[in-house]
Amino acid sequence: VQLQASGGGLVQSGGSLRLSCAASRFTLDYYTIGWLRQAPGKEREWVSCISNTDGVTYYEDSVKGRFTVSRNNAKSTVYLQMDNLKPEDTAVYYCAAAPSCFRHDNSVIFEPSYWGQGTQVTVSS
């Protein structure tokens, strides 16, 4: 199982980036794909995920309305469209694969089985 994240870069506040997560050596249909990020000096945090069974999407509160996750199984790729970026979005972004992604009480459960390497996103003010 291999995941390759790309699309990061430097953008001004209010700008947009689209991250891609390309899967190889496994069938994307069988996995829920999620995005996580880690800012300098902070713990890694979950950002978003998209179910492989029904396409349901979940977002961390701070990115709701600004980020959109989508998947193209035919291309074995998951995308994270990031609009209206803020300096606090600066982080290394990782994509990961998990058996599922679901809401439980007030939390979203996403427990990765496989990780891709990260891609740096830097938002300048």
Image (spheres, rainbow, N blue to C red):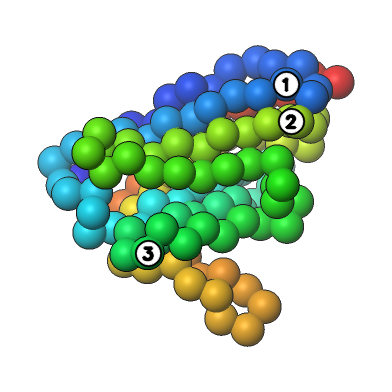
| Label 2 sits on residue | 85
Task: Mark 1: give few (<14), some (14-19) or many (20+) Cα within 10 Å.
Answer: some
Contact check, label 1 and label 2, Cβ < 8 Å:
yes
User: Quick check: 25 left or right of 117?
Assistant: left
Q: Is residue 119 above or below residue 36?
A: above
Could you say whether the residue bearing mark 3 is in a helix, strand or loop?
A: loop
Task: Mark 3: give few (<14), some (14-19) or many (20+) Cα within 10 Å.
Answer: few
Question: Which label number is shown at residue 15?
Answer: 1
Tell me the distance, in whole angstroms, between the alpha carbons under discs 1 and 2: 5 Å
Amino acid type at image mark 3:
Asp
Tell me the distance, in whole angstroms, between the alpha carbons under discs 3 and 1: 30 Å
Image coords of residue 52 (percent x, y): 33, 59
Whether residue 121 is visible here, answered yes or no, is yes
Image coords of residue 78 (percent x, y): 39, 40
Image coords of residue 62 (percent x, y): 75, 51
Q: Residue at x 68, y 31 (%)?
A: 83
Q: Quadrant of the C terminus?
A: top right
| Label 3 sits on residue | 54
Amino acid type at image mark 2:
Leu
Mark 3 or 1: the one toward you: 3
Amino acid type at image mark 1:
Gly
Could you say whether the residue bearing mark 1 is in a helix, strand or loop?
A: loop
